[in-house]
Image (spheres, rainbow, N blue to C red):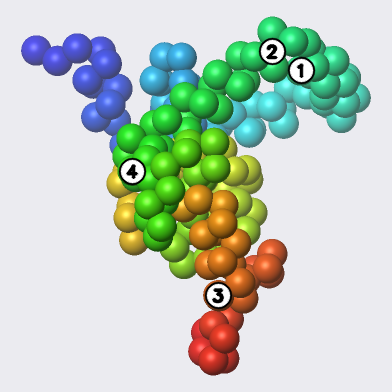
Amino acid sequence: MTTMSEANKAKTHCKRGHEFTTENTYIIPSTGSRCCRACDKAKHKRYTSPEQRESAKAAFRKHANKPEIKIRRRHHREAIKSALFEMYGCTCALCGFSNPDALSLDHVLGNGADERAELGSQWMVFKRALSEYRPEEYRILCMNCQWLERKRLGCHGRSRWILKDGAA
């Protein structure tokens, strides 16, 4: 006999037929439940006018600056960072530096700007990196090595990186 949780985990599509892919699935951090992004986007579009959206954005900005909200967000960011370190290691992959305050997720292929644009935010990139171990795509680097790699690859905020010898 399977539980409701196991039955839901086995589903490959939402109730409206959208596939549960990494890009189309949002995991609710507090419950671990999956939500379909396509359905969520359609729901928000259907039930909110431009005026309602602006009003909601203003309320969010006012609410987001409260100290308790900032503290909660900081703890959430720290939890995500800890999970990334647990999965990809807690030292710089190039130099071995281990201060967590100076470590961050690096795109091995130098395509971080493209991935952030595709997924919508850096937090979605983190969630994708955490959904499955991908050492060929991600690694942990210290900020010094991040900048040195960026200079070596020649990717200074451009969507396409070029190696120094001109090869792409």
Which sits earlier in the primary sequence, circle 2 or circle 3?
2
Label 1 secondary element: helix
User: To which residue does mark 3 refer?
Assistant: 153
Element marked by disc 3: helix
Is the Cβ of the residue at disc 2 closer than 8 Å to that at disc 4? no
Which residue has dot 4 on it?
89
Residue at (76, 17) in percent of width and height: 64
Q: Disc 2 versus disc 3: distance between alpha carbons? A: 38 Å
Residue 117 can be seen, yes or no? yes
Q: Is residue 30 left or right of residue 66?
A: left
Q: Please state which of the two labelled residues, at mark 2 or mark 3, is closer to the viewer.
A: 3
* Sequence order check, earlier mark of 3 and 4: 4
The span from disc 1 to disc 2 (Cα, nearest Å) is 6 Å
The residue located at (80%, 17%) in the rendering is 65
First along the sequence among labels 4 and 1: 1
Q: Name which residue type carries label 3.
A: Leu
What label sits on residue 64 in the rendered view?
A: 1
Per the rendering, the mark at residue 69 is: 2
| Numbered disc 4: secondary structure | loop
Quadrant of the image containing the N terminus? top left
At horizontal 62% and vertical 58% (from top left) the residue drawn is 113
**In the image, residue 87 lies at what x, y percent?**
32, 39
Q: Amino acid at mark 2?
A: Ile
Mark 1 touching mark 2, by CB under 8 A?
Answer: yes
Q: Give the foreground label among 2 and 4.
A: 4
The image shows a total of numbered marks equal to 4
| Residue at (48% x, 36% y) in the render | 100
